[in-house]
Amino acid sequence: MVTPLLRMQLAASHVALAALGVAALGVLAVYPGWTVVPLLLLLVALMIHMLSARLATIGQQNASGAGPDWLVPLLIALGICGMGWLHDGLSDAVYLGIITLVSAHLAGRRGVSGPPLWAWMTPGTALLLLLAGALIGQFGGALVLSTLLGICSIAAMALMREGALARG
């Protein structure tokens, strides 16, 4: 997917701006009371954001012309908080938003050791769990489950960093 974009000489900052736009649209789609549409838009924004980072890496460009790298995860966290507010789970949504921001920041840093990548509660993982919960009609349960899994993920990162889990 990156190769055609490289051939078209598309700047990574333009793709990053598109990711910001789609993420902002996802946050705005929370306002009418929708749940599935904002989740899908935020997932698309996250994929576009990852594509822009890959495009910047392969094309040896700087994608930060569209703003800091944490803006898309911040918009995703705001969207999660808005959906939590709609479904009377604002406190869980705020916790989940903070957890996804912290894990996105730690995942962006390459020097952080910790659990395997599948065990991290990233914004994408949170969105997929929330989408599954919304599709089966249990958004509140998915929000609580995502928050608990996120807390376990942050605890595993902290313990693996200290070496407490590595020693057994």
Image (cartoon, rainbow, N blue to C red):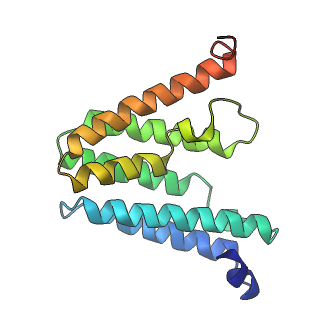
* The quadrant where residue 119 appears: top right
Residue furthest to the front in view is: 168
From the viewer's side, name the closer residue of 152 and 83. 152
Residue furthest to the right in view is: 60
- Residue found at x 44% / y 33%: 150
- Residue found at x 62% / y 30%: 115
Quarter of the picture containing the C terminus is top right
Q: Would residue 10 be seen by someone viewing this image from the given angle?
A: no
Q: Is residue 153 above or below residue 48?
A: above
Q: Would residue 1 be seen by someone viewing this image from the given angle?
A: yes
- Spot occupied by residue 108 in the image (x, y as percentages of width and height): 66, 46
- Residue found at x 62% / y 67%: 51
Quarter of the picture containing the N terminus is bottom right
- Spot occupied by residue 39 in the image (x, y as percentages of width and height): 34, 59
* The quadrant where residue 52 appears: bottom right
From the viewer's side, name the closer residue of 119 and 31. 119
Please state if 34 lies on the left or on the right of 118 as rendered: left
Please state if 99 lies on the left or on the right of 167 as rendered: left
Please state if 166 lies on the left or on the right of 94 as rendered: right
From the viewer's side, name the closer residue of 11 and 37. 37
Q: Is residue 100 above or below residue 155?
A: below
- Residue found at x 51% / y 57%: 72
Residue furthest to the bottom in view is: 8
